[in-house]
Amino acid sequence: MKINSLINRNTLYVIASVSVVTLLGFYLRYIGIEKENGMWHDEIVTYKTAANESIIKVIKSSIPRPFYFVLLHFWIEWFGNSDLTMRLLSLVFGTLAVPAMYFAGAELQKTYDPEVSQKVSSLGITTSLLTAINSFLIYYSQEIRQYALLTLVCALSAYVLLRLINKPDKKNLILFITINFIFVLTHYISTIFLFFELVFLIVYFRLKNEIQYDKRFNKYIIIMALAGLPFFLVLLKLFISVSFQSKKVLINTFDPYYFDYQTIVMIFQNWFTPILTGIYNNAPFYFSELLNNLRPGIFIFIILPLILSFLSILNAVFPGDKKLKPVHILFLTPFLFLMVDYILSLTKTYIIISRYTLFCLPYVLLVLGYGILKFKNKIIKLLIIFLLTAISLLFILLNPDSAPKKERPEGQKVIQRLLDGVNVSLQNKDIIIFPIDKAFSEEHVKVKPRVCNMRNTFLDDETVYRLIGVEQAKNIGKINSRKLFLNYFRADFYTPPLEDYFNREIYKNLEPGRFFILAHNLQLAYFSPYDIKVYIRNEKLYNKLSLKFMLYSKISADLYKLANEKMELVETRKSFPWVISIFKKVEAQ
């Protein structure tokens, strides 16, 4: 039955249903989008990359994942560079992922119900609803990073994959190539993900004996291989560079990240429950701690959603005949990616951390929705959907620490408030030193002192001699750096080259009456001198701890001693995670 000549009743129902769920997704992502603490380090790096005047510079500095940075570059040109404006781009991508998941779910339903095009897709609505209320996706829909775009592109990748399975023609083939090429341009790690997808797709068509299609598919493999080869080579180069000794990098890229065999359970919590944990670094012994602190709230908001999700996924994948189905491709692709990621994490060649797995989630949610609707009992289906929705909405709307309301760590506005609150007038004649660079964006935070950072000043191949001496610095690399830093950790005082740097670059560059500011970050430099002395005595423990964070802690303590000896401590201000110590160079007596 047609409502008018342009739209039929079914289309109207689809538009209405998808619109309602999309508006819910938009609302949940818009709550708390203005962050009081402002951008954190990774967002500042992203902004500074995208804000380059030349689009060529943007591409060069963001290779091998330039797509989001190019889009953000033009977004900034058109709408401005305020925190809120830039977060809105991620909000747009995160919201668009909701209807994209409807159409992906509808295509999945067509693989076993060809008549679904004549009605509203129950699987499409279920998967779009699961996407709209997912706390992990909501969180990154407010982040000035590429993750919301990755979610959208991955949802579209699933959609075109299923379209190709349902109708393997030239049009869908070109669409599949195009979307997945954008996928690779958004993040190069997707090459591993797409590799598994291609393998299972080839096996699927072979088992179906689609001989007419196989000829086209061979051409497609060649095209995709040629398009993805540069990105695969970049990925291979990255893995080699972080796996073997490098004269340019002293510390493993993934050194700051904690990893143990329980980490995967924490990732599942972030995928399927409204309580997010270990967003920026994996929590040690996560599962053991969870079980030791089991309370009613933990059971309702973590354990119950995990149980319901796992039961539904198992129901989607295992019962029934042993034939390879499209839902198995959607399950096996992220599953094998996680397994590879897990294996690489054992050697810190790569690291399995929640945000690096986010683009797996659209595929997993499609499998979850499929598994829910596969239950034969209608009451069970509705009960699972109701519980997952109610639990998520209850926590998101009522808990002040829910995904859309969470502040970013190390926000630059925290530093701004600390520096604005001191009883001194800071100028460009003053010097401030941070653990790492990109602690703030000068365009957003009008901080006047000259900025230095510990990473570039002490932890590269040309400056590390200030910590361990000239002779040892000649031969240091990732393989032996932990051993060579031991003497520095054992020392109770700063090294002569470090004192020389302080005198020459800081003390002598300050006029009498001007200030040196030491910005100490308790999330990056959280080891006390006593802790370091204890930990280095235990070789096994020492090798597990973050070398970079231990160095930040030791360097920060040494700089504090030097400044305290040679200058007057004017004021110390604290606002987690920052401790700002301000020293004044006094007039010579």
Image (cartoon, helix red, strand yellow):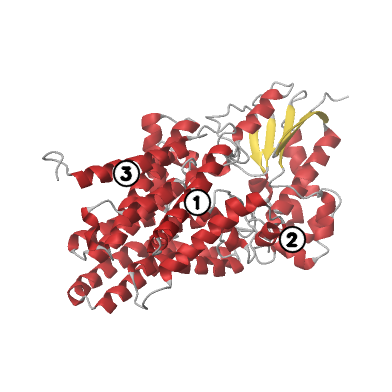
Q: Please identify, in this view, whether the residue under mark 1 or under mark 3 is nearer the observer.
A: 1
In the depicted structure, whether residue 587 falls above or below residue 336: above
Check the image and report above or below for 302 versus 58.
below
Residue 7 got which mark? Answer: none
Relative to 487, residue 424 above or below = above
Residue type, mark 3 in image: Ser
Q: Are marks 2 and 1 in contact (CB under 8 Å)?
A: no
The answer for how far apart the CA atoms under marks 1 and 3 are is 20 Å
Asked if the residues shown at circle 2 and circle 3 are in contact, with their CB atoms under 8 angstroms apart, the answer is no
* Tag 2: amino acid: Glu
According to the image, label 3 marks what residue?
Answer: 17
The residue where tag 2 is placed is 471
**Snapshot quadrant of residue 327:** bottom left
**Residue 360 picture location, percent across and down:** 45, 59
Mark 1 vs mark 3: which is more N-terminal? 3
Q: Is residue 194 above or below residue 87?
A: below
Residue type at mark 1: give it: Leu
Looking at this view, is 413 or 370 the one in front? 370
Which image quarter: residue 513?
top right
Q: Position of residue 365 (x, y in %)?
A: 43, 57
Sequence-wise, the earlier of marks 2 and 1 is: 1
Extreme residue toward the left, this view? 5
Please tell me how crowded label 2 is: few (under 14), some (14-19), or many (20+) other residues with Cα within 10 Å: few
- Marks 1 and 3 close (CB-CB < 8 Å): no
Callout 3: SS = helix
Most foreground residue, 353 or 435 = 353
Is residue 459 visible in the rendered image? The answer is yes
Name the side, left or right, on which 425 lies relative to 325.
Answer: right
Q: Is residue 175 left or right of residue 21?
A: left
21 with respect to 473 (left or right): left
Between marks 2 and 1 in the image, the one whose residue lies nearer the viewer = 1
